[in-house]
Image (cartoon, grey):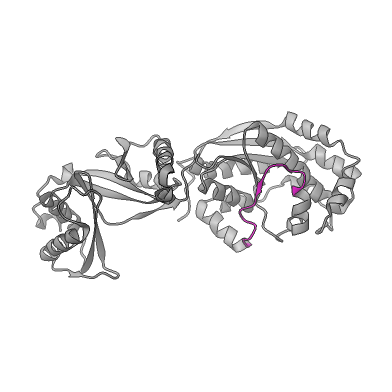
Amino acid sequence: MTENYNFGIEVERLKRAIIIHYHEINLKGNNRGWFEAHLQNHIPSCLKGLKYHKVRKISGRLIVELAQDSPIEALEQRLAMVFGIANFVVAWEVPAEMDAIQSGLDYLIAQGDFQSFKMESRRGTKNFPLNSQQLNEQLGAYVQQRTGADVRLANPDRTFFVEIVDNRAFLYFNKIPGAGGLPSGTGGKVACLLSGGIDSPVAAYRLMRRGCRVLFVHFHSFPHTSAESQDKVRNILQVLSRFQLQSRLFMVPFADVQKEIVAYAPPPLRVILYRRFMVRIAQTIAEKEKAKALVTGDSLGQVASQTLENIQTISSICTMPIFRPLIGSDKEEIIQIARKIGTYDISIQADQDCCSLFVPRHPETMARLQQAEEAEIGLDVPGLVRSCLDSATRESIAPDFLTVQPND
C-alpha cells in the first residue's frame, strides 16, 4: 500500500521518538518538578545497554529520542515496568507544520487497511495556530479524502493521534500502558520480609509502585533445610529488580532461634515466636539501612499466624510501622498480581523454607501478648537476635533483562 503514496518527506529519514506521559505526577502541584526529575533520572538506568539518543523533558512529557536502529520492542518492554508512567507511545516526529503533518499521516495511512478511523489531536503549545478541535477537523478531512474511510468516534478500526509539542508534531497509532504509580525513590526506603512464597513479592511490588525503594530480608534454616529457598528468593528478586533495578538482600540464618524456641516454648506458640523474632531482626536491619518501615505479605485470616489477634501480638515488639498492603486481599487477587509481574511461577516452586521446620500440629490462632511474653522469658532474646545479625550475609541482586520477562 505504501507505493500508492507520494510522501512529502523521506520515509527512511522519519525521526522516531518515544513520548512518555505521566501518571500521578500530574497531580503533584508545586512538587511536580521533583517527581519529574526522579523519573527522568531513572529512565536511562532502566534503558542501559539499549541504543537511543537521549531522554529529555518537554512540555509536561518526557521524550526518548531514538536512533534509526534503536531496538523498539526491547525499549517498550523496559519502559512498561517503569513506575510513574501512565502510558507511552512510539511516534513519528515531523515539524509542526500542516504539510509535514499531512505527509506523516500519509505514512501512517500506508501501514495497513482500515474502513473507519478517528482523529485525536492535542495541542501542547499555544504557538500553533490551530486548536485541538480545528486540528481534528482539518486532519480528519485529509485522511478521509486520502482513504475514503468513514469517521467513527466509537470503536474505529484505527485511531490517529497527533501531539503538537513546541515546534514538533508527533504522530502515532497506539498508546502502550505504563506501570502507573510513583517514580522509584520518591517514597522512601522500606524493608520487606521475603519468604519466597506468593504473597511477600506482591507486597514488595505494591510498595515499589508507591515509589519506595525496597530492601529484602530472607530467613532460612540451612543446613537443616535445603538451600532451595535462598536460590528461590534470588530468582524472585531478579524479577522484582526490574522495577527498581538493584535490590539489596539480607540472608539471615534462623535455625538456632527455632531450636531455642522449640526447647523452651509451648508448641502452639512456636510460629508466633518465630515471627516476633523475625520482626525484631528485620527492624534492626531496617534501622541500620535507614529504612523507615517494614513490609510483610500478611493477608488477614489466610493462615494461623495472620489472624487479627496474632498479628497484634507479633507487631507489638516493633517500634516502626509495618505495612501490610495485602491485608484485605484474597488469595486469587494476590495470584493475579503475581502472574502479572512474573513472580508466580517461581513462587510456586517447591522448597523448604524456615517455617517448615519445627511447625506445631495445632498452632495458636488467638495468641495473647501476655502468653507470648511469658513464653519468651526462658529465651536469651537479645543474644539470639545478635547472633542472627552477626551471621547474616548481604547480597546485591540486579534484574535479568535477558531471560526474565513479565507476563502480559
Q: Does 354 sit above or below residue 102?
A: above
x, y (%) of residue 201? 59, 49
Q: Position of residue 134 (x, y in %)?
A: 17, 60
Left or right of residue 198: residue 108: left
Q: Nearer the viewer, residue 81 or 286?
A: 286
- Residue 328 in the image: state x and y as whole percent: 63, 60
Q: Look at the image and tell me whether residue 106 can be seen.
A: yes
* Residue closer to the observer: 31 or 50: 31
Q: Which residues are magenta?
A: 315-330
**Image quadrant for the C terminus?**
bottom left
Left or right of 213 on screen, residue 175 = left
Q: Residue furthest top?
A: 390
Q: How many marks?
A: 0
> Quick check: is 163 in the magenta stretch?
no
Drawn side of residue 54 relative to residue 407, left or right: left
> Quadrant of residue 278 in the image?
top right
Residue at left 62%, top 56%?
326
Quick one: which residue is furthest to the front in this view? 30
> Residue drawn at (33%, 45%), measured in percent from left and top?
61
How far across and how far down the image is residue 398, in percent?
A: 52, 36
